[in-house]
Amino acid sequence: MIKTLLKSVRQYKKDSILAPIFVACEVAIECMLPLVMAELIDRMSGESFGPIIKLGIALVVMAMFSLLFGVLSGRAAASASCGFARNLRQDIFFRIQDFAFADIDHFSTSSLVTRMTTDVTNIQNAYQMIIRIAIRTPLMLIFSVLMCMTISVKMSFIFLTLIPILGVVLFGIAIYTFPIFRRIFKKYDALNNSVQENVSAIRVVKSFVREDHEMKKFGKAASDVCDDFTSVEKILAINNPFMMFCIYVAFMLVSYFGARMIINTAGSSLTTGQLSSLINYGVQILSSMMMLSMVFVMVSMASESAHRIVEVLTYESTLTSPKNGLLEVPDGSISFEHVSFRYHADSEKNALSDVDLTIEPGQTVGIIGGTGASKTTLIQLISRLYDASEGCVKVGGHDVREYDLQTLRDAVAVVLQKNVLFSGTIKENLRWGNKTASDDDLVRVCKAAQADEFIRQFPDGYDTRIERGGTNVSGGQKQRLCIARALLKKPKVLILDDSTSAVDTRTDALIRKSFRTEIPDTTKIIIAQRVSSIEDADMILVLEDGHIAEQGTHEELLKQNGIYREIYDMQTKSKEAV
């Protein structure tokens, strides 16, 4: 796990190494200060002011160097931890880009968001503590104990007795809180999921007046997180009081036994300055233990976060590009050879069963069927968003598993019913299809998609800004912009997954007509609920329960008096009734 995480340090290795070095220098100077201070106190006999001035200057210089190394270590640690977090988020995001749909389903969107935000922040804080405080604490502990022993072995046993007691308490707290932190992060996922669902579906929530229900659901998720954090904080609250108690006990014992040694031996075994040094070293030792407890808490919290992040970074996607994969798709021909598919290996029923189909380059194929007929599932196998469980899907005469994934998906453009527009101008959104497209290219494809007219009605035309998710354009406008974006790719295969459902039949017909002139050689697959959207297709497929129930042209299917004829008659009668 640590090895995987450290790969994200990269260009911040220098700062990660310098921070501990500066900390070591800071600690070494701080451990020397009490000795100089002891000498200064013992020289305050009133005989000469010269040694006091020299020792005072030495203290000031040492303090300034300690401050310098402290600042340098802080800067290096901040740079290293923030850079590490940046790289970690980038690595997670890049890893997610390679995930298949099944991989996203495995983790869930809300969980991935939590891992990239809360979990990475926990690791960032822990990493900064590790390269600074976790280095400082043991060094300070060891140096301070050694310095105490050089002054008085007997007195140092007071601190040596308290250290293991504190260590046991700290270790016990860490062991107890670790499983609670694990539970908290799972509840964070549920909390984020509640927020994500509510915000993305806020219009539905308001239209059904379900605000109270959503607030109760969120309140329950927030309360679960709060309750677990409260139980952890109650345990951690024991930490500081117990530490302070040990510090005060140590001071009392050192002061008592130290005073007796000074009086009984007339300062021969222990001087006043040395007693002062022992107290200072005692503060350093016990303060180090207190800082160590903070490190324990942070590392305990970050440990579960680290497991969750490494799970994403090391997850083997179900879909990968083959070694030396094909880098060119010859044409838009498509064939399904006895293809069956199921979403999970342990599913009892196939989503697709024994699909056998051949589509020639440039053909227009219509797909129709009831809800749950697996129309979308069928087309997702073409661009290899999922792999067939049985059989083979070929594009351009080659198995889709032989292609480099980017090459295959560049050749297949998919326009979904609920496609997404991103924050930015209309031009920027369109150029997702081709980042080098000229303004003339944008106008041409928008005319083909019947989008040019409404775009020009905007005050800023093609420079009109689209809000996040395309909330400031209608459903039909969004679909036409997405179709134009897909056309810019000049794909070998264009798939419209019910992507003209929000436009009127006239506009739908004009879009299909423009395809014949704009992309005559592109294979076009149109999934639709309206017969009018596919009646002029070269071939129509009727899907039912995951298999092809009927296949043929519009006229041929009408003559069969099957499912297609039933759908056609129902829609025709509905129009006549209107």
Image (cartoon, grey):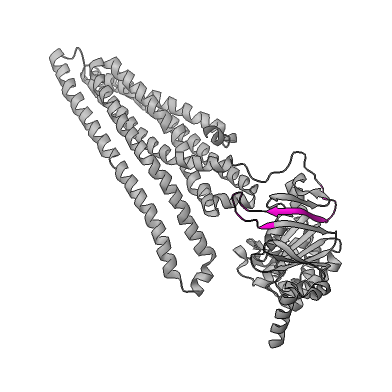
x and y percent of residue 229 in the render?
A: 36, 49
Locate residue 258 relative to residue 411 in the image: left or right. Answer: left
Which residue appears at 65% of the width and 71% of the height?
475
**Whether residue 5 is situated above or below residue 497 in the rendered picture:** above
Locate residue 321 relative to residue 514 in the image: left or right. Answer: left
The span shown in magenta is: 328-352
x and y percent of residue 53 in the render?
A: 31, 22
Provide the major secondary structure of the magenta segment: loop
Which residue appears at 82% of the width and 61% of the height?
523
Frontmost residue, 284 versus 64: 284
Frontmost residue, 80 versus 181: 181
x and y percent of residue 205 in the render?
A: 49, 70
**Magenta stretch encompasses residue 348:** yes
Which residue appears at 85% of the width and 54% of the height?
331
Whether residue 490 appears in this view of the structure is no
Whether residue 367 appears in this view of the structure is yes
Snapshot quadrant of residue 471 = bottom right
**Whether residue 478 is situated above or below residue 289 in the rendered picture:** below
